[in-house]
Amino acid sequence: MLILSPDKVTFAGEPWREVASVSIERAAEKSVLEWSDNGPHAVYGDVPEERMTLRVVRVLSESELDGPAPGALGELVLFTSNGASDGRRRRLRALGVIERIAYQYVQKSGATQTITLLAVSPAGDVCPLTIEPA
């Protein structure tokens, strides 16, 4: 999932300004495949453990001396809409722990900050991401 130019982004109640994009990636942390004696192709597949990674890309217009740090746990909340109408406006929420903060500077286009969070479920059987009407 990719959200371009979200309207508002906060982490642990603190606003994150100039967010260019938020990506939500899902990957199998553990996968299971089983075969039968009938042939070479798998007959069963499952992903019992999944990892959800959130990447927030911010455009920096000035030096960044403080901010989030790896290990910080908080709720990431963002608002987005697919059009000018508030009727399609959505709020996405996920509890996450910051894993990494990286910076890139390109002379012509400026600096960006990429914050990588690992989504954490409040209970193991509940998806850590909630999408609801705003």
Image (spheres, rainbow, N blue to C red):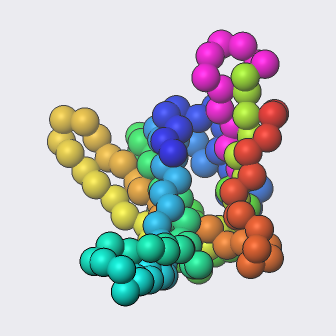
Q: Is residue 40 visible?
A: yes
Q: Is residue 103 left or right of residue 10?
A: left
Q: Is residue 41 left or right of residue 123?
A: left
Foreground residue among 107 and 72: 72
Foreground residue among 48 and 124: 48
Q: Is residue 9 left or right of residue 58?
A: right
From the viewer's perspective, is residue 92 above or below residue 99? above
Q: Is residue 18 visible?
A: no
The residue at the far left in this view is: 107
In which quarter of the view is residue 12 placed? bottom right
Measured as percent of width and height from the top left, residue 35 is found at 40, 82
The residue at the far top in this view is: 84
In which quarter of the view is residue 60 placed? top left
Foreground residue among 77 and 28: 28
Foreground residue among 123 and 19: 123
In which quarter of the view is residue 50 placed? bottom right
From the viewer's perspective, is residue 89 above or below residue 86? below
Which residue shows up at 28% across the image and 54% down it?
A: 104
Q: Within the magenta stretch, is there residue 104?
A: no
Q: Is residue 39 left or right of residue 76?
A: left
Which residue shows up at 81% across the image and 34% down it?
A: 133
Measured as percent of width and height from the top left, residue 96 is found at 65, 68
Which residue shows up at 42% across the image and 42% down it?
A: 59
Q: Within the magenta stretch, is there residue 81?
A: yes
From the viewer's perspective, is residue 87 above or below residue 89? above
From the viewer's perspective, is residue 111 above or below residue 118? above
The residue at the far front in this view is: 38
The quadrant of the image that shows the C terminus is top right
Q: Which residues are magenta?
A: 77-87
Measured as percent of width and height from the top left, residue 9 is found at 65, 44
Measured as percent of width and height from the top left, residue 69 is found at 54, 73
Which residue shows up at 60% across the image and 48% down it?
A: 16
